[in-house]
């Protein structure tokens, strides 16, 4: 049967990036097949608005089971593959190093092998990470910067990143790595520091929380909006030749600055509500991550649209409104 729509396979479709990417691709007229890990709780909140769309299909599976990857590719014959699945929390990777490597590193290998075997013509996007640069002092980081990973998560990402180049060269696959710097949104997981801050600020405003406990406030990151970054993922797979790209804003801000912006919007006193907790410091800290996205700007014609202050305001506003709505529903 002849396909009438392009088909995209998205691993990790219920995550922050997966949700934004699914929306983006469906609006482009794609059929989107998303792989979701099976859990006892449904946890499809980020894609619930897509479940009635006939072009959006969820397949249960995970990155440690090759059979589901092969079966899914055989059934749907995807034109594009976006590998977004991961145990993506850097701090947690120190506690779960084997699981992190199994999902992030070996999972990428399994997906590449399935694609090479079943749909070798498909275009493959790999979610690489700025964490791969680790504590390399020579920033800002570009595609050619030395990788010095400083966490099990980053080490696993380096493995997957190198696999992409290997399969591109060895098997002539159209495989690209997007080296994305920190990208946030109202859909960011609640354990990540930006969302932790915006949720706490909203809860403090409603009297539901008194204190916010944080770790290293001096860590500097290059923060952008996830909705902007998924556009770059798609653009990479529309080029004539496969390549790797850094996606970043080029600006760095400390955790303290993000905290100050959010608490200023919320009209809250940091000294009154924020305390430092040593439990949230990592065994190996990455002091600064700053990206040079000039190649993406030149080749992909991509630039971020949402700035740092707009991002912080967007995230806090969504958390505040969600709490407000939930309280009204209970009345």
Image (cartoon, rainbow, N blue to C red):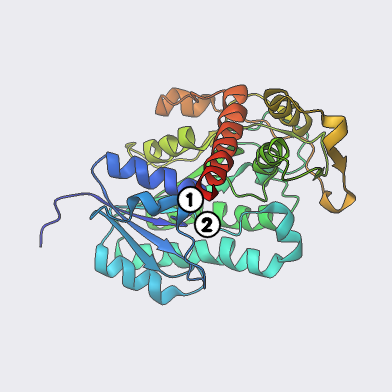
The answer to whether the residues at label 1 and label 2 have Cβ atoms under 8 Å apart is yes
| 146 relative to 162, above or below | above
| 182 relative to 124, above or below | above
- Tag in front: 1 or 2: 1
Left or right relative to 203: residue 18: left
Label 2's element?
A: helix
Tag 1 residue: 126
Q: Is residue 282 visible?
A: no
Report the disc number at residue 163.
2
Residue 181, percent from left and from top: 60, 37
Residue lying at 50% horizontally and 47% vertically, measured from the top left? 329
Label 1's element?
A: strand
Q: Nearer the viewer, residue 25 or 74?
A: 25
The N terminus appears in which quarter of the rendering?
bottom left
Q: Nearer the viewer, residue 72 or 114?
A: 72
Residue 42, percent from left and from top: 47, 66
**Sequence-wise first label, 1 or 2:** 1
């Amino acid at each position: 049967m002849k396909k009438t729509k392009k088909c995209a396979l998205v691993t990790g479709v219920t995550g922050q990036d997966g949700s934004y990417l699914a929306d983006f691709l469906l609006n482009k007229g794609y059929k989107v097949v998303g792989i979701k890990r099976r859990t006892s709780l449904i946890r499809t909140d980020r894609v619930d608005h897509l479940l009635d769309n006939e072009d959006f299909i969820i397949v249960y599976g995970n990155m440690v089971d090759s059979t589901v990857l092969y079966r899914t590719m055989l059934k749907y014959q995807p034109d594009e593959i976006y590998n977004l699945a991961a145990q993506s929390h850097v701090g947690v990777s120190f506690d779960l190093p084997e699981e992190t490597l199994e999902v992030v590193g070996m999972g990428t290998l399994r997906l590449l092998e399935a694609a090479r075997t079943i749909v070798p013509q498909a275009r493959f996007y790999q979610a690489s990470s700025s964490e791969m640069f680790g504590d390399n002092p020579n920033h800002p980081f570009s595609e050619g910067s030395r990788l010095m990973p400083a966490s099990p998560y980053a080490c696993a990402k380096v493995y997957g990143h190198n696999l992409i180049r290997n399969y591109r060269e060895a098997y002539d696959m159209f495989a690209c790595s997007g080296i994305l710097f920190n990208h946030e949104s109202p859909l960011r997981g609640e354990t990540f520091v930006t969302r932790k801050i915006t949720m706490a600020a909203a809860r403090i405003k409603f009297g539901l929380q008194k204190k916010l406990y944080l770790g290293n406030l001096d860590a500097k990151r290059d923060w952008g909006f996830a909705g902007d970054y998924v556009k770059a993922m798609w653009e990479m797979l529309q080029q004539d030749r496969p390549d790797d790209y850094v996606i970043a804003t080029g600006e760095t801000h400390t955790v303290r600055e993000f905290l100050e912006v959010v608490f200023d919007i919320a009209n809250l006193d940091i000294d009154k509500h924020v305390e430092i907790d040593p439990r949230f410091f990592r065994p190996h800290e990455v002091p600064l991550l700053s990206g040079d996205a000039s190649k993406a700007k030149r080749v992909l014609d991509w630039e971020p649209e949402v700035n740092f202050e707009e991002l912080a305001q967007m995230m806090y506003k969504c958390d505040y409104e969600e709490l407000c709505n939930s309280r009204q529903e209970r009345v």
